[in-house]
Image (cartoon, coloured by chain):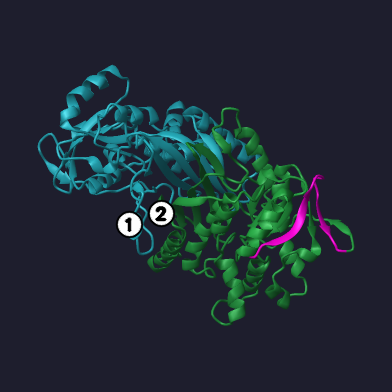
Chain colours: A cyan, B green
Amino acid sequence: MSPNNQFKDFNEDSIIKFLQQKFSSSTAKALVGIGDDTAVIKTGKSYLLLTKDLLIENTHFIFKVHPPYLLGRKCLNVNLSDIAAMGGKPNYCLIGLGLSNKVDWAWLQEFFAGVESATREFGLELVGGDLSRSSTVMISVTIVGKSKYPVLRSGAKPGDLIYVSGHLGEAAWGLKLLKKGYSLGKNKEIDYFIHRFLDPSPNLKLGQQLVRQNFISAMIDLSDGLSTDLRRLCQVSHCGAELWVDQLPSSPLVRKFTSRPRDLTLHGGEDYHLLFTVPASREAVFTRWQKKNKYQLFCCGRIIEKNEIYLVWPTGRREVLRPRGFRHFA
Amino acid sequence: MSPNNQFKDFNEDSIIKFLQQKFSSSTAKALVGIGDDTAVIKTGKSYLLLTKDLLIENTHFIFKVHPPYLLGRKCLNVNLSDIAAMGGKPNYCLIGLGLSNKVDWAWLQEFFAGVESATREFGLELVGGDLSRSSTVMISVTIVGKSKYPVLRSGAKPGDLIYVSGHLGEAAWGLKLLKKGYSLGKNKEIDYFIHRFLDPSPNLKLGQQLVRQNFISAMIDLSDGLSTDLRRLCQVSHCGAELWVDQLPSSPLVRKFTSRPRDLTLHGGEDYHLLFTVPASREAVFTRWQKKNKYQLFCCGRIIEKNEIYLVWPTGRREVLRPRGFRHFA
């Protein structure tokens, strides 16, 4: 989903609510339809996962800035991140491409080389799509995956611990650098941040392992920022959360460059780490498993009953955290 | 697929060839990937069908001309037509929407009322999608269906008879009227044609029956015009065809208004009828079945060995038919 989409007289969340009401029915065969990372459909012993994400020129990427190879990877990887958030395995993808007259054969070849590298890396097949003229470039990707035990956003319970699967704010810092006019290939540190934005990586293996080990109660991928995505998880779980300010997984690299890393940590999007909740009863075994594995997982808060999200300081000071998602280029 | 897409230094057909080479592999689990009406994937005793079509403002529709209710129906129905061309049954759909600042809540409600009417009419569930800002409106629909016996484009053999499931040219005539400035609600005859363009209907039942009765060897839906779509079918079937000029299913209604109905019959797109081939051995039983049913099916040619498409006059005169697909608004 795109971040904080405010339109003329509606926003993304209001339209999703409207659609959930309009299109949910008692005869629905889909276990989860509109409003989770993917749709989840029971098929035999397993579940079919369906996800669709748009990447639109000047909203999600700038044609001249985003190298086509990395754009080809990213349009798949942001969808794969949704599959990861279900603990799923990807199988097939379809790509719809609206192409403007800026696109030439060289661009297309690079773009599909990027697509190919992601399909190889994550083991999925490109099986179809559509191609059309368009005034601006737009990419629509659908991924079909499966999961034996999909983890929804709606399973969090008061007392569950909140984990994030990596440092936050690096992609948003990369975007800031791009907006300031920095580009790839001149400085290693700058390249690192820009790459975190242009070429994110889905946490498919981690998602699958967390689900297989039955560690977690709810999961979402961090596409639009911690404050926005944690709120989404809490809303469908009918609960709230407290985030511990001294435990927030701010990127130490970002901290070197900015005096206000917390804003990027809380509201910067596009990191595509996983946010998940671990029931207190699974905490001990989860911690033992975590020590044996190489994943960087940060415990940074707890689910609470009250439908509100708080920042909590070590001193005990509490402050309501308002969602303030990421706004890309738009 | 969009019609005759000619870009800077490539076209739709050249990129499809490139992608088929790049993404086909000996380990592919998809029975059919890129290049048929839908992707076809074996799952247990049945086949999963996956289709994706884009509708882009100013390429496929004009925002002010296309009522949002009919656009909501059309974006599903053109995809359902691909499912029909496989003899399939639709199950689920996802919709990606890029929305410009022209879109307001009233437009969106009308659009989704149209989506709902098509999901009800054809028995499928909207299970997900994506929403984003965009400089122009763009719609990406994915439909997931299934078929026990999917019919590919590639099964036609020399001697097979060519059938079309309805009169051709009416949608293209409707588009012409729109381009000339005519609009809905002023004249019944004009409304009929404009509706044929704005609100096409997929031939799902016919497709399913043809497949269940085992009548046909190949099928494609007529989205881009007879000359273009028959050529596509012939190319993957490694054959050619002759079309009998006196048997072409020109619309008698269109004939009333234009002195050159044949151009619209051969090259006008968007009628969304089915084009299919019947082996000579099935012709007798097919004809008996057809007499019992109410479908308007027109036999208008024959598959031949030579890789060329000919128009054949009753006098015996033959002329090579060049593809000249439909160009929408672009």
User: Residue B166: percent from the left, percent from the top?
Assistant: 65, 64
Residue pictured at 58% horizontal, 80% vertical: B188
Residue A289 lies, with reference to residue B161, above or below; the image says: above
Whether tag 1 and tag 2 are in contact, CB under 8 A, the answer is: yes
Is residue A5 at all visible to an observer of this figure? Answer: yes
Q: Pick the residue in front: A3 or B118.
A: B118
Q: Pick the residue in front: B8 or A24.
A: A24
On residue A25, the disc is 1
- Disc 2 residue type (three-letter): Glu
User: Residue B231: percent from the left, percent from the top?
Assistant: 73, 50
Residue pictured at 65% horizontal, 74% vertical: B180
> What subunit carries mark 1?
A
Q: What stretch is highlighted in magenta?
A: B296-314
Residue to which mark 2 is pinned: B125
Residue count near mark 2 (Cα–Cα under 10 Å), binned few <14, some 14–19, many ≥20? many
- Disc 1 residue type (three-letter): Ser
